[in-house]
Amino acid sequence: MFLPLKDNLPKASFPMMTFVLIALNIAVYLMASSTPMAATNAAILYGVIPYELMHSGVQCVPVENMTAMACGTTAEIQAIYPGIDLPPTWLTVGTSMFLHGGLAHLIGNMLFLFVFGGALENALGRLSFLLFYVVGGTAAVLGQTLWDTGSPIPMVGASGAIAAVLAAYLVLFPSAKVWSLFIIFPVHIRAVWVLGTWLVMQILLAWESAGAGQSGGVAVWAHLGGFAAGAALTYVLVNRDEIAGFRRSARVAGGLFVDQIDPPHGSAQSPEVAAVPAGQRYVAPHPAQQSQPVQPQQFVRAPMPARDPFAPPQQASQQATG
């Protein structure tokens, strides 16, 4: 598996919301993990328990010195722990996204959010990115809950919400390059390979868990649920032309090829696309302005103009031709 370190996409603005989410996750982890007992209590009280979500009015608490869980009505729970104050079940859907099962769990999630969250925040905008993150995390909770409806095991972590971010990045920027560690070797590889490998691993883990009938451990169905929701939400929030523009920007940044003047919608002709080194560009006459198809020899070399990599396609075209 590839461990991402940094992508090559320039950021049009500072990804403030991404860093706010990272800071919140770290702060909650530090507060909830002051002692091992505090960490366990936080996971039980504020983690998502699928059995609770699927049974209205039922809540779960630890028994037998934290070695088992007991689920029952509020009256039954009060008999075990008189005066205990349990948060409403619906609230745990949100609080579970900011809890983690250990330092390695936290670092891994925050690294993925740091690498892939900034570009998506620039693409969607801060508030839309935050909404996307929360909806993706909620879908992840539902995915795991529907798979294992009877589980009394608390589920914690931002993995599901971050899986939604990975899906959106894969849709918008598949050609972006990412510095990653493969075992111990640094590699500069396209995002489609990094994220595609991650997705295949999740599918294999889900297949294995389904065959073994296991519950607990890695909430792989939360990862898949968040990923599916993130891909679907991307096509809802970003229109077709914008998606094409983001993909074009990623290709330019990745050095695959540079784009050319966009033909008008409905045009039967399109200019030739030339594979050229990054930083150079071939410009052809617009097909709507000529009677003959564009021939390869008509391309002329011109310097690459400065442009906003996150500009919509029409704006990018105007910058290129102005």
Image: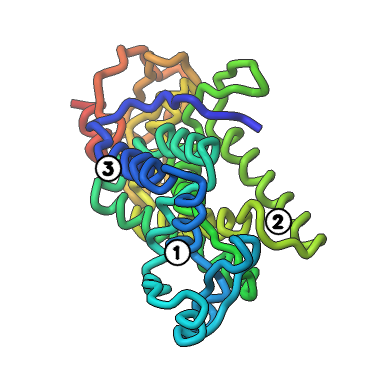
Q: Mark 1 points at which residue?
A: 45
Answer left or right for 240 relative to 208.
left
Answer left or right for 239 relative to 1.
left
Q: CA–CA distance between discs 3 and 1? A: 27 Å
Q: Which residue sits at x=38%, y=14%? A: 280
Q: Earlier in the sequence, mark 3 or mark 2?
A: 3
Instruction: Answer whether residue 196 is visible to the viewer in this image.
Output: yes
Q: Residues within 10 Å of mark 3 (few under 14, many from 20)?
A: some
Residue 61, given in percent of the width and then of the height, sits at 53, 70
Residue nearer the viewer, 105 or 33: 33
Q: How crowded is mark 2: few (under 14 residues within 10 Å), some or many (20 or more)?
A: some
Q: Name the residue under label 2.
A: 206
Compared to 244, does 92 lie above or below? below
Looking at the rendered structure, the kind of residue marked 2 is Ala
Given contact means CB atoms under 8 Å apart, are the residues at marks 3 and 1 in contact?
Answer: no
Residue nearer the viewer, 135 or 88: 88
Q: Quadrant of residue 289?
A: top left
Tag 2, which secondary structure? helix
Q: Which residue sits at x=25%, y=46%? A: 125
Given contact means CB atoms under 8 Å apart, are the residues at marks 3 and 2 in contact?
Answer: no
Looking at the rendered structure, the kind of residue marked 1 is Leu
Q: Which of marks 1 and 2 is nearer the N terminus?
A: 1
Q: How is the image coloured?
A: rainbow
Q: CA–CA distance between discs 1 and 2? A: 27 Å
Compared to 16, does 95 lie above or below? below
Q: CA–CA distance between discs 3 and 2? A: 31 Å
Q: Mark 3 points at which residue?
A: 17
Q: Earlier in the sequence, mark 3 or mark 1?
A: 3
Tag 1, which secondary structure? helix
Instruction: Answer whether residue 167 is visible to the viewer in this image.
Output: no
Q: Quadrant of residue 291?
A: top left
